[in-house]
Image (cartoon, rainbow, N blue to C red):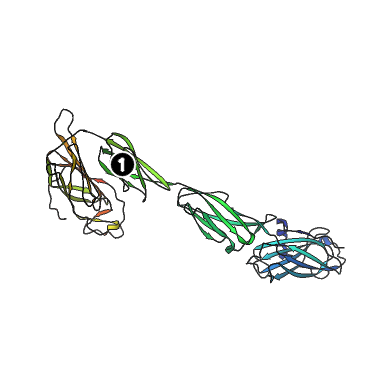
């Protein structure tokens, strides 16, 4: 009598036994079973290989290998093998194995990439049956269906700009991993603004874009299964702000720069523009300048000082044909020539600044720095004057008084913003019309244009720089 068939998928031990089968001699015709037991007779097996509903045959399948292993009296010898081609349909295929010893056996079916029954294991199944002498016993084997998929690694936490590779894995009901065609996997990321995903078959590369959380998902349509993984994107960028420790007078402006582009500026104790120009308020003290992006932030301290609050000034003050040395960001020293006239009787401020052999980099690469020649109409009081031109340039003038008990002013401070190629110009004039300090901050990187300098491929970051204190005698300036 035939035994009731017991269908199961292969265990890892069975797969190991099958892997070693190629090293065993295949027994066909008369022979003995395992452990030297005599075989009374032989029979045949008609094997039907079924693929479960919803589980298509993997596209890479080229062959199915059938192996018969003796189970009595002891589990052991592989006594018959046969390789059948990929079935014409996606539901079943059949093969006959004859000259099989009439004992209890295990019939194993494995799907492979190669046509000769070798290569990666794509699916597997097994059934146990007793072979009857001179009989033909039907055997039905169901190849293991994919019942679960997962994404590895177990957790995904990356920094902004960092990438990690995810991989998708499929498993049958016994927990054995099953190979799936690379083109079968479908990857996605939600939302794609937090992290991007670049599919590559069974793998995908995930890159953090901004700080936040997202979900990476993979779909295996042939099995009707999906899996997902939380992706956490954290900040890792430390933004360096220059200057690192600045002192700014009340109401004065100072330019700051960040080590990364596209930052959002914030400030306490005053206001700061989108380009990093900070204008101090009227309250002295310690305050902060900060710059941030979706991937990081940085901050520096700024001290606001009001050394001589309450100064007032009226009249005309002029510094004419004054030259000063200016240190350019490339380390060279260039000569700047100044003409400054402030008049409350005319309510105007005229500023002319010429820079010797200076060229712009970045968007204005190769262009000579424009001659600064601008007249501001002034409004306000003797304590604080301002002016704006039609082109958008602005000036802020504040007189600083001498120490208490003295009369007159110590100096006028002119802060100018919005000029072509320059984020900020500061000029301080004392009561005798001497320029005692200047500050220049370009809005584009610039370098000194010496005749023997090769500037090809130069890059740089705009930053503020100061002249030396005091005025210089006029020189033979050639703009």
User: Residue 333, percent across and down?
Assistant: 22, 50
Structural crowding at the residue carrying mark 1, measured as other residues with C-alpha within 10 Å and reported as few (<14), some (14–19) or many (≥20) = some
Please tell me in which quadrant of the rendered image residue 29 appears. bottom right
Please tell me in which quadrant of the rendered image residue 48 appears. bottom right
User: Residue 204, percent across and down?
Assistant: 53, 57
Residue farthest top in this picture? 405
Q: Helix, strand, or loop for circle 1? A: strand
- Compared with residue 377, is residue 87 higher up or lower down, i.e. above or below? below
Q: Foreground residue, 472 or 277? A: 277
The quadrant of the picture occupied by the C terminus is bottom left
User: In this rendering, would 149 be left or right of 323?
Assistant: right
Q: Which residue is mark 1?
A: 271
Visible in this render: residue 25? Answer: no
Please tell me in which quadrant of the rendered image residue 56 appears. bottom right
The quadrant of the picture occupied by the N terminus is bottom right
Residue drawn at x 52%, y 55% is: 189
User: In this rendering, would 380 be left or right of 82?
Assistant: left
User: In terms of secondary structure, what is the magenta stretch mainly?
Assistant: loop
Count of numbered badges drawn on the protein: 1
Tell whether position 457 is magenta.
no
- Compared with residue 119, is residue 420 higher up or lower down, i.e. above or below? above
User: Residue 141, percent across and down?
Assistant: 75, 63
Please state the extent of the stretch shown in magenta in the rendering. Answer: 51-56
Visible in this render: residue 40? Answer: yes
Q: Foreground residue, 305 or 333? A: 305
User: Residue 438, percent across and down?
Assistant: 20, 44
């Amino acid at each position: 009598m035939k035994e009731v068939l017991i269908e199961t998928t292969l265990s890892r031990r069975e797969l190991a036994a099958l892997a070693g089968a190629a090293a065993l001699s295949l027994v066909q015709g008369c022979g003995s079973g395992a452990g030297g037991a005599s075989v009374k007779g032989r029979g045949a097996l008609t094997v039907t290989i079924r693929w479960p509903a919803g589980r298509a045959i993997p596209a890479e399948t080229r062959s199915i290998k059938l192996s018969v292993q003796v189970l009595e009296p002891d589990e052991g010898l592989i006594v018959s093998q046969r390789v059948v081609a990929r079935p014409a349909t996606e539901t079943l295929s059949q093969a006959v194995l004859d000259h099989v010893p009439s004992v209890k056996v295990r019939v194993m079916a494995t799907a492979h990439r190669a046509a000769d029954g070798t290569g990666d294991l794509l699916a597997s199944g097994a059934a146990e049956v007793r072979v009857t002498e001179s009989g033909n016993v039907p055997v039905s084997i169901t190849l293991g269906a994919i019942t679960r998929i997962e994404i590895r690694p177990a957790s995904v936490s990356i920094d902004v700009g960092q990438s990690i590779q995810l991989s998708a894995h499929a498993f049958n009901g016994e927990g054995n991993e099953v190979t799936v065609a690379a083109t079968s996997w479908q990857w996605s990321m939600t939302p794609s603004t937090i992290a991007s995903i670049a599919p590559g078959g069974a793998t995908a590369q995930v890159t953090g874009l901004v700080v936040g959380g997202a979900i990476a998902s993979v779909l295996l349509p042939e099995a009707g299964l999906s899996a997902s993984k939380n992706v956490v994107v954290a900040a890792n960028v430390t933004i360096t702000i220059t200057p690192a420790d600045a002192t700014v007078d009340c109401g004065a402006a100072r330019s700051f720069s960040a080590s990364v582009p596209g930052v959002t500026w914030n400030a306490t104790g005053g206001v700061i523009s989108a380009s990093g120009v900070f204008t101090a308020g009227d309250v002295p003290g310690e305050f902060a300048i900060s710059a941030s992006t979706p991937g990081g932030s940085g901050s520096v301290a700024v001290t606001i000082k009001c050394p001589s609050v309450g100064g007032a000034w009226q009249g005309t003050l002029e510094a004419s044909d004054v030259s000063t040395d200016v240190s350019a960001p490339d380390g060279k020293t260039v000569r700047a020539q100044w003409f400054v006239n402030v008049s409350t009787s005319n309510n105007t401020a005229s500023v002319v600044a010429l820079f010797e052999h200076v060229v712009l980099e970045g968007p204005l690469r190769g262009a000579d720095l424009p001659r600064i020649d601008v007249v501001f109409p002034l409004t306000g009081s003797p304590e604080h004057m301002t002016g704006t031109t039609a082109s958008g340039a602005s000036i802020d003038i504040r007189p600083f008084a001498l120490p208490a008990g003295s009369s007159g002013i110590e100096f006028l401070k002119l802060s100018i913003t919005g000029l072509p190629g320059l984020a900020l110009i500061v000029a301080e004039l004392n009561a005798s019309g001497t320029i005692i300090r200047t500050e220049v901050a370009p809005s584009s990187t610039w370098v000194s244009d010496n005749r023997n300098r090769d500037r090809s491929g130069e890059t740089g970051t705009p930053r503020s720089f100061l002249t030396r204190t005091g005025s210089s005698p006029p020189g033979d300036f050639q703009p």
